[in-house]
Amino acid sequence: MATNTTPASSSPLSSTSRIIQLAATISSSVAKLQEILDAAGSPSPSFDQDAPVAPLPREALAFQDAVLDATAELHDLLLEPIELIFSHGAHNNMACLQAIGRFNIAALVPLAAAATTSFEDIAAKTGLSLSMTRRLVRHAMTMRIFCEPQPGFVGHTQASRWLAVPHNSTWITTAGDEMWPATLKMIESAHTYPDSQEASQSGFSLANNTTQSIYDVMAMDPPRAQRFATAMHAYAGSPGFDAAHVLDHHDWASLGPAKVVDVGGSQGHIARALASRFPELDITVQDFAPVIQGAEDALPPDLRPRVRFMAHNFFAPQPLRADVYYCRWIFHNWTDKYAVLILRGLASAMTPGSRLLIQEICMPEPGEIAHWRDKMYRAMDLNMAAVFNSHERTVSQWETLLAEADPRFQLRDVVSPPGSVLSLFDVRWNATEEMVEGRPKSGGSYLV
Ligand SMILES: C[S@@+](CC[C@H](N)C(=O)[O-])C[C@H]1O[C@@H](n2cnc3c(N)ncnc32)[C@H](O)[C@@H]1O
C-alpha cells in the first residue's frame, strides 16, 4: 500500500523515480480494486448520473487508500508550487458551491437520463446573469458537478444528481451560507481570542456579528436551526457514519441484559438500530426536550418496551444507573473546558463494571493514516474550530481530558472500524482509586 509521501527521487533520469513508483502503485492497486468489485458484482465507479451511490466493499478500502494517495501525490508532483497552492485553495470552489446551494441549481436540471437544460434557462430561474451562470456552472464541472454533453446544455453527473435531493441541497446551502462565512472569520477569532474555550468567540459568532454562540443564535431562529440540523443529518447519513460501525465493532452481545444510556442521542436512530440487533438491551436516549419530541411515538411497536426517551442536559449529573453510557459525536462540539464538565456529569453515575463508550473522530498523528483521510479529518477539525471553537481529539488528548475530568476514567481500547469516520473509545471506571474528601488521592482536579 502506498501511503508514502516522501519527495520524488532526486535523480531525474532514474527509472524508479517517484512518479514511476506512483504509477506502478496506481496500476497494481486499481487492478486489485477492480477484481474486488467484479467479485462483489459491483459496477466500476462512474461519474454518470445513474451510477449507484454505494460504499466500496470493505476489502477494497486499503486499495482505495493506495490509489487516492498515489494519484493525488502524482497530480501534485506535476505542478509548479504556485499551481499546487492555487489548486488546493478552495475559495473558488466554495463560491460555486454557495451558488449551487443558494439557488438550488441542481434541482433546475432535469433528472431523466440524458436530459439537459440550457444555461439560459438556469440563468432565468436563478436571476444570475447568463455570463455568471455559465462561469459558475462550468467551474462546478471541473469538480465533476454537472456536465455539458452538448455545448450550452447542462446535464447531471452522479454528484449533481446527489445534490438535487432536498436534504443534500440543504447540506450544501449550509456549507455555503453558514460554514464558509464562519471559516472566513476563523483566523480573526483565533487571533483575537487565542486559546478561547468559548463558542461565543468563534468565527461563527464574528461572522454573525454577535457575542452569542451558535447555540444561542440557533435557539432564537428555529427555521435556521432546522436547516442546520437537516444539513447535519444529510452529512451523517453517509456510509462513514453508518450505525453498523458501532453495532459490528463493540461486543454488545456479551453484555447480556444491559442498560444503555445514549447521551445526546437525538431522535434515537442509533438506539433503534442497537435495540433491533440486540434484543437484551434496554436503552434510554437523552437529549434536549425539543429534540426528542415525537421520537417515542415514531418507534416501531416492538421496540417501545426497550427504547425510551428522556429530556436531560448532559452538563447536569447523570440521573440514570446504566451498564453503558454511550456518547456518539457529542464531545467534538465542545472545547475541553466543557467536555470535562460533560464527563464529570457522567462520572457521578459510573460504578465498577460500568463503561463509557465514546464514538468520535480519532485525530491521527501525522503520517498515521492515508493522506486523503488525514486531509478529511483535518478539514473536519477546522470546521469545529470555525463554528464551535472546539476541536477533534487524538488518543493522547482523550487520555488527558479523561484524566482531568476524573482519574478513575481509564481508556482501555480504541477501535477504528474500516470505513468508519468515527472511532470507538472504550472507557472503564477504576473504582479502586482512593477518594479523599471527594477528590482522588492521586491528584487531578476532580470537583463534585
Ligand atoms: C452532533 S449531534 C449527535 C447526535 C447523535 N448522537 C448522533 O450521533 O447522530 C449532538 C447532539 O447533542 C445534543 N446536545 C447538545 N447539547 C446538549 C446538552 N447540553 N444536553 C443534552 N444534549 C445536548 C444535540 O441536541 C444533538 O442531538
Image (cartoon, rainbow, N blue to C red):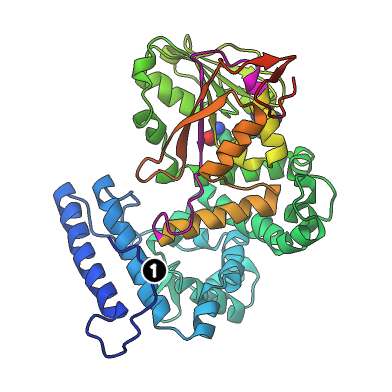
In the rendering, at what x and y percent does residue 307 appear?
50, 15
In the rendering, at what x and y percent does residue 161 appear?
43, 58
Q: Is residue 374 left or right of residue 123?
A: left
Position above or below: 106 against 17: above
Q: Quick one: label 1, few (<14), some, or many (20+) residues within 10 Å?
A: few
Residue 352 falls within the magenta-colored stretch = yes
Q: Which residues lie in the magenta part?
A: 345-370
Label 1 sits on a secondary structure element that is: loop
Do we see residue 46 in this rendering? no
The residue that disc 1 covers is 5
Position above or below: 350 against 145: above
Residue shown at the point (58%, 43%) measured from the top left:
397
Q: Is residue 290 left or right of residue 259?
A: right
Residue 266 falls within the magenta-colored stretch = no
Residue 308: image quadrant is top right
Near-viewer residue (193 or 176): 193
Residue 63: image quadrant is bottom left
> Residue extending furthest bottom?
13
Do we see residue 200 in this rendering? yes
Residue shown at the point (64%, 41%) measured from the top left:
333
